[in-house]
Image: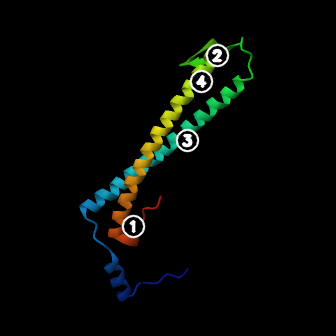
Amino acid sequence: MQRRMLSKEDEAAVGADETEVRREDQDKINKFSRLHQREMLLEDELKLKAKDKEDLEEISNELELADEDDKVPYKIGDSFFSLPLPQVQEMLASSTEKIEEEVSVVEEKLGELREEMQKLKVVLYARFGRSINLET
């Protein structure tokens, strides 16, 4: 790859395309960056909750094969308690519902966050055009 110096005309043309970054522009760029970081954290949280939900559903399916009279170890906090199968199934169902509610809350937050990011993208691309890259 051969390198060459820009001619005076090319250098002037490049300088003419650049837009001055004002304080409010920098604030919007910073806000977009913070929102993007929060988006990544929420996506990670959503993945963890989806895995937890999947694990609970798998456990529920396994317990369907268990005998009704069996005592099943159930973890509460750091301890395991032997509980009757129907009670464990109820507790698993309530845990699954709780995780589903948490997932919907996180998805709602993620949707609001992405809307705000999209608005900032529109404003910043209108101001800077191809001079800025906000693709994540």
Mark 3 or 2, which is nearer the eye? 2
Residue 118 placement (x, y as % from top left) = 40, 58
Q: Separation of disc 4 and disc 1 at Cα?
A: 49 Å
Residue linked to disc 3: 47
Q: How many marks?
A: 4
Q: Which mark is residue 86?
A: 2
Q: Separation of disc 3 and disc 1 at Cα?
A: 30 Å
- Is disc 4 surrounded by few (<14), some (14 to 19) or many (20+) residues within 10 Å? some
Element at label 2: helix
Q: Separation of disc 2 and disc 1 at Cα?
A: 58 Å
- Is disc 3 surrounded by few (<14), some (14 to 19) or many (20+) residues within 10 Å? few
Element at label 4: helix
Element at label 3: helix
Task: Note whether 1 is above or below 90 in the view shown.
Answer: below
**Residue at (48% x, 34% y) in the render:** 102
Disc 2 marks a residue whose amino acid type is Pro
- Is disc 1 surrounded by few (<14), some (14 to 19) or many (20+) residues within 10 Å? few
Residue linked to disc 4: 92
Residue linked to disc 1: 132
Residue 26 placement (x, y as % from top left) = 30, 60
- Is disc 2 surrounded by few (<14), some (14 to 19) or many (20+) residues within 10 Å? some
Disc 4 marks a residue whose amino acid type is Leu
Disc 1 marks a residue whose amino acid type is Ile
Q: Separation of disc 3 and disc 2 at Cα?
A: 29 Å
Element at label 1: loop
**Residue at (74% x, 16% y) in the render:** 67
Q: Separation of disc 4 and disc 2 at Cα?
A: 10 Å
